[in-house]
Image (cartoon, rainbow, N blue to C red):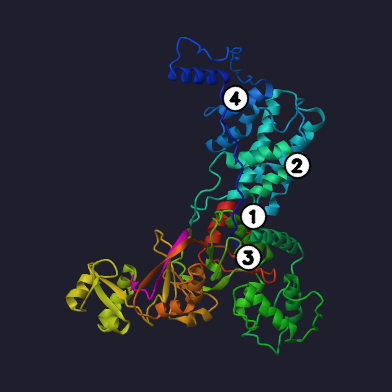
Amino acid sequence: MRSPLVRSPACPAWSTKRPLAPSGLLAGACLALALLGCSDGARHPDASPPGPEAPAAVAPPVPTGAAAVLQGRLNAAEGEGALPADERGPLQALYQPGGWRPLWLDQAHRPGPSAAEAVRLLSGAAAEGLQPADYQAQELQAKVAAAQSAGLPGDAEAAALDLALSRSMLRYLRHLHAGRADPRRMGFRTPEKATDPNALAGPLRAALQRQRLGEAVDSLRPPLEQYRSLRAMLARYRSLAEQPAPAPLPPVGKDLRPGQPYAGVPALHQRLVLLGDLPADAPAPAAGALYEGPLVDAVKRFQARHGLPAEGVLGKSTLAALDVPLARRVRQIELALERMRWFPPLQAQRFVGINIPMFKLWAGGPQALDGQPALDMDVIVGRALDTETPAMVEEMRYIVFSPYWNVPRSIVREELLPALQRNPGHLAAQEMELVQGPGDDARPVEVTPEHLALLEQGQLRVRQRPGPKNSLGPAKFIFPNDDAVYLHGTPAQQLFDRSRRDLSHGCVRVENPLALAQWALQDQPEWTRERIEAAMSAGQQARVELKQPIQVLLFYVTAMVSPRDGSIHFATDIYGHDKKLEQALYGSPA
């Protein structure tokens, strides 16, 4: 699937430095002469005669009219009508370089072409999954239309409309670039975006000067093919949601298998054509037709797109997915677009992206997820409710082959100690040992009642030796973070046969650690496939530093578009993050 990650273009900045005034140059020249031994205005015999006296520095003109109103409003830090602090900085950066003059109105207080373009952009914010009402699109449209013929009567009215247009456009650009919700409050640990006042004001002012507001929008919209694809899908699903509801699907008593009769075959055919899983020109079946042929293939495609076993068996889970209202799918796409606005720009480095609710990993260069990734595989993530995998952005720095597994204290307390009470030989059977002290060179101790008591008190710990039973598999991939989460293999390969794979204690288990290690070490040619395989099976821990760090993005979206065929895939909201974000953005579910 296409990825959420490609480096954002740098936002132009506006310099506030002033050139040195002529009087400043003169003072600097006098200082240089003094250092050379000249004083009291004495002139060296070979020096040229003094030139004309430099003019005094000219003070910037004092704003008048609407500009004075704007300056007063934008510099007022408190009192009635004071702007919020997070808006005042970008607005000052927008207006100050032009001497506080109106940006959207001419000298006769009539809105110019850019004002009309701004209203058009704000009115079309829904195409980005945003809400035009957040930017007063309707109100501004009416005010601009009313002022275009005769202009506004006074400076205060002109300044108010000009400021309203600027505030709405900056808010729109901020939402488009960084999202409406604070990702950190939504559990996504990523650096804050657009904190520099010029990050938004610079592109907007440049676009205004060229009368091309679309340039500012294009420079601040996420530059991702996945974003563009989802944006197109949003328009398509909104159109589908506006159509009359399709015929209901009759329930099935048991799982319906290919070749069996089903009264809902015509309705199922209609539903799958609507969703694009069955070609529009597929012959419509007659009433009483069997569930077979192209209809079964279409159900398999639908199942694959919705994280269900693509077996063609029509059961309760598949029927439930078919019955999800299209308005709900629209909302999933809107939430996915919002989360993609949170993504940081990729540095000029490779990266690994993991979509938690879709149980998928992609790896490649900075543009891999906007095309075919170099690597993709299934993953297992943390269990819902108790050991969720956190969303974050970090850097992979090293790989450990044949790793020890240092068993977390929570697992020792909740799982190992009860097992040891039932069977004191449990540790030996699992290739585990009690150790004393930190680090991988900690000293093993015997399993005795006294040592088990110390283990219960937290004075000893448990680790699993490298080998076929090791829970981390043959390798772990480390990107240091506060949650001690990392990627690793697993001996339980049969778990990848499941369609829903939230089964871990928080770390991410990868399906093919050998392929991931080969990809990660591709710029270190001494690490051949044979050497990697030998290190994975050596039974002795070995740490390999990466020459260049690899950016790791653990993210959470429940709607993505496949680069292979352009189809949209939906996932279950396993952690309830969509529900939380929807409440923050809309207040109620769709």
- Image: magenta residue range: 394-407
Q: Which mark is residue 223?
A: 1
Give the x, y percent position of residue 294: 74, 83
C-alpha span from label 1 to label 4? 37 Å
* SS category of the residue bearing label 3: loop
C-alpha span from label 4 to label 2? 27 Å
> Which mark sits nearer the N-terminus, 2 or 3?
3
Does residue 216 appear to the left or right of 41 in the view shown? Answer: right
Q: Answer yes or no: do the residues labelled 1 and 3 have beta carbons within 8 Å?
A: no
Q: Which mark is residue 2?
A: 3
Q: Which three-letter amino acid code belongs to the residue tagged 2?
A: Glu
Q: Answer yes or no: do the residues labelled 2 and 3 have beta carbons within 8 Å?
A: no
Q: Magenta: predominant secondary structure element?
A: strand
Tell me which residue sits at (63%, 37%) in the image: 167
C-alpha span from label 1 to label 2? 22 Å
Q: Nearer the viewer, mark 4 or mark 3?
A: 3
* SS category of the residue bearing label 1: loop
Q: Which three-letter amino acid code belongs to the residue tagged 3?
A: Arg
* SS category of the residue bearing label 2: helix
> In the rendered image, which quarter is residue 436 located in?
bottom left
Q: Nearer the viewer, residue 232 or 4?
A: 4
Confirm whether the magenta stretch covers residue 351: no
Q: Quadrant of the N terminus?
A: bottom right
Q: Which residue is mark 2?
A: 117
Q: Which residue is mark 4?
A: 72
Q: Which three-letter amino acid code belongs to the residue tagged 1?
A: Pro
Q: Answer yes or no: do the residues labelled 4 and 2 have beta carbons within 8 Å?
A: no
Q: Which three-letter amino acid code belongs to the residue tagged 4?
A: Gly
Give the x, y percent position of residue 557: 57, 63
Q: Residues within 10 Å of mark 2 (few under 14, many from 20)?
A: some
Q: Nearer the viewer, mark 2 or mark 3?
A: 3
